[in-house]
Amino acid sequence: MGPEEDQELIDSLRLSLVADVGPITRRALLERFGSPGAVFEAAPDELRAVKGVGPKLLGRIVAARDEIDPLREMALCRRHGIEIITERDARYPRLLGQIHDPPSVLFARGELLPRDAMAMAIVGTRHATRYGLQQAEKLAAGLARAGLTVTSGLARGIDAAAHRGALSAGGRTIAVLGSGLLRMFPPEHEELAAAVAQSGAVLSELPPEFEPLGGNFPQRNRIISGLSLGVIVVEAPERSGALITARLANEQGRDVFAVPGRIDSRPSRGCHRLLRDGATLVESVDDVLGQLGPLFEAAPQEDGTELHHPAELTLNDVERKILDAIDSEPTAVDHLVSATGLGVPQILSTLSVLEMRRLVRRLSGTTVVRN
């Protein structure tokens, strides 16, 4: 890291540590001044003109150069193996950056990979039934085996079952905390957090020593949904943080799914409400993959290929071969015959399958295009 990059990280971290500079105010400051360093060089009158900057916040920003020590936080992170990822870092998840209030800094243990663009969140109540725990673990394992990363909040109940399900299948999983990484909550999940960091990442937007205060958890829910293509709710009573995550996912343009339960089960009432309001009913992983739309950007895979749609994960060899031969420009069936060596009847029947999965679109009886 060069001196300029180092100073940019210092300024970015200092701004993130100013009390009450949330994501929206930070974005307004950066739009006005261009960089975190320029924010601290700005005159008080210029700062006061930015929406969201009142007298108290103005005072905190002006005093931040003397009162906030980013170098201490950076040294603390180095000692404990915590990475600091800013919005300008290549490791920052592009999908998360698309929400209207992305975190300015992520503190991370573990590793974020490009393939994590294919992520699904599984959330639910801390007071789960045996049925809920089984469904969360089963769905997470199925998603992981299909090649998706499972995101959740490392809370008791459904969240922990989701992480364990992904780990049991040898998949990747990401946990987002409502506390600093050195203030694990709940404390009994230290071992689970270590396992998640080995097979994915444990993240927080809060400094490492930040305590798990109640108001932090609704805020972290936007990160869980923001990292994900969609959110699956498994058991949630009518007043539940999982329903907040579902609402945020909907606002972010992400898909919302719900697992049905017994009609007399209190932990399933929130899921049933989501289903009445239009959420997709989930009985299996196929229900999820069949509903998801095209990716924001192609997700690199370990074999060097790129996926453009989650439904591609379920293709057999023939379906994959035909899809790879279809361009984003109109492609004739005759071209597919010569490119794949397959017969016309097999190609036509496979195109029908690909069309049902919303991977291709017919322009005519003999011409298709990739979605």
Image (tube, rainbow, N blue to C red):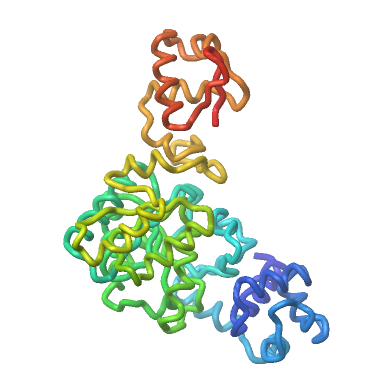
Residue in front for this viewpoint, 106 or 150: 150
Name the quadrant of the N terminus: bottom right
Left or right: residue 52 compared with residue 137: right
Establish if 335 lies above or below 146: above
Most distant residue in the left direction: 130
Left or right: residue 211 compared with residue 53: left
Residue in front for this viewpoint, 188 or 279: 279
Establish if 253 lies above or below 85: above
Residue 315 occupies which quadrant of the picture? top left
Name the quadrant of the C terminus: top right
- Residue at (61, 60) in percent of width and height: 89
- Residue at (29, 46) in percent of width and height: 142
Please say whether residue 152 is visible from this viewpoint: yes
- Residue at (66, 75) in percent of width and height: 25
Establish if 46 lies above or below 194: below
Give percent across and percent down for residue 67.
64, 91
Please say whether residue 199 is visible from this viewpoint: no
Give percent across and percent down for residue 53.
71, 82
Give percent across and percent down for residue 44.
80, 86
- Residue at (43, 14) in percent of width and height: 347
